[in-house]
Image (cartoon, grey):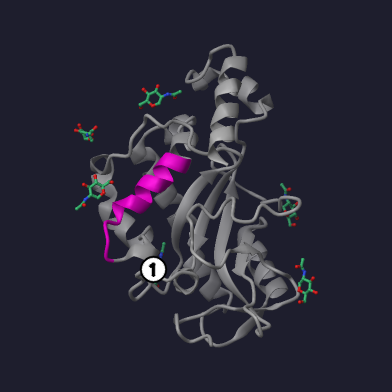
Amino acid sequence: MKPPKLHYWILGCFSMALCCGCTADTSLLSDTHPHTWDKLYLAHHWPVTVCKMSANDCEDPPEYWTIHGLWPNKVDDCNRTWHFNVTEIKDLMLDMRRYWPDVLHSSQNRTQFWKHEWDKHGTCAATLQILNSQKKYFGKALDLYKQVDLNSSLLKAGIKPGSTYYKMTALKEALTRAYGVTLKIQCLPPEEGEKAQTIGQIEFCFTKNLELRNCTEPKGGSKGMQTGLQLGTGELSVCNDTLPTYYPLQVQGHK
Ligand SMILES: *[C@@H]1O[C@H](CO)[C@@H](O)[C@H](O)[C@H]1NC(C)=O
Ligand SMILES: *[C@@H]1O[C@H](CO)[C@@H](O)[C@H](O)[C@H]1NC(C)=O
Ligand SMILES: *[C@@H]1O[C@H](CO)[C@@H](O)[C@H](O)[C@H]1NC(C)=O
Ligand SMILES: *[C@@H]1O[C@H](CO)[C@@H](O)[C@H](O)[C@H]1NC(C)=O
Ligand SMILES: *[C@@H]1O[C@H](CO)[C@@H](O)[C@H](O)[C@H]1NC(C)=O
Ligand SMILES: *[C@@H]1O[C@H](CO)[C@@H](O)[C@H](O)[C@H]1NC(C)=O
């Protein structure tokens, strides 16, 4: 998937009259350009579900929603020469460790996950002035995460992890009521012989002005495309409205 995209991106640059990089005053151009982005996803994932999906070294996953990434739609890997440099975000380190942990590789070098997010998504988001450095990109993602405060909204709506099954429609309604916009909710489909899906990821959509907007579900589903990381066996996809939904508290509790 990657080479063709890069190819289009390069072609796109040429068709924009060699104006790559002078993003500050090309907003009119970029809005009509087919290969630029118009929406940011702030993806939260539920660490317990992420660990269930993969045989990696998850250890005591946090029992709160953590950041997966801040992703412009439609584009990937926009600038392969802009290398991740963890020193640039050293001031954010406490928050990064707590709210943006590498759930799957808890005992390894956790900066790999941030590097992946920067390379794939941050370099694309950086066309916006408010996100045009590593410190701004990661810092703004953390700000938005705190602003939406998904942990609290779910708790306030009485939605807690554990052994209860939720109706997807009730979950969606509670979240739409809390935020005034529709979110994108992804689940791990039922395993063979099971009837419940497992909630795994919740994405908020933002405009380029970083205002909340509705997430419209892509036609035909773009499975995996926006999961950002290779997550092993299972794949998240848009939750099925009619299946009971499990919100697990422990990695092993579900068999
Ligand atoms: C890519 O990133 C490098 C390093 O920050 C920068 O010098 C260059 O202008 C960027 N290229 C584009 C097309 O934005
Ligand atoms: C990483 O960032 C720091 C702080 O901005 C800078 O001093 C250092 O030279 C950078 N390292 C590389 C390899 O670019
Ligand atoms: C962790 O990974 C980063 C980015 O790839 C690298 O710069 C750093 O040296 C690594 N640290 C350790 C302790 O391996
Ligand atoms: C989410 O909940 C956890 C556990 O209650 C807490 O540590 C964390 O600070 C919360 N996140 C935010 C952004 O409030
Ligand atoms: C967003 O979705 C809600 C709920 O479906 C709807 O009432 C509202 O009009 C939508 N807002 C916009 C700006 O499309
Ligand atoms: C949702 O699940 C039901 C019951 O298993 C199934 O009949 C239906 O096809 C599913 N819908 C989608 C969109 O996958």
In the displayed structure, 17 sits above or below 151; it is above
Q: Which residue of the protein is positioned furthest toward the top in this rendering? A: 17
* Quadrant hosting residue 171: bottom right
What residue lies at 69% left-to-right and 73% top-to-bottom? 168
What residue lies at 63% left-to-right and 30% top-to-bottom? 35
Horizontal and vertical percent position of residue 147: 47, 55
Secondary structure under the numbered disc 1 in the rendered image: loop
In the displayed structure, 3 sits above or below 254; it is above
Horizontal and vertical percent position of residue 19: 53, 15
The part of the chain drawn in magenta is 107-120
245 vs 208, nearest the viewer: 245
Most frequent secondary structure within the magenta stretch? helix
Horizontal and vertical percent position of residue 184: 63, 58
48 vs 80, nearest the viewer: 80
In the displayed structure, 121 sits above or below 14; it is below
202 vs 229, nearest the viewer: 229
In the displayed structure, 131 sits above or below 110; it is above
Residue topped by disc 1: 56
Q: Quadrant of ligand 6?
A: bottom right
**169 to the left or right of 184:** right
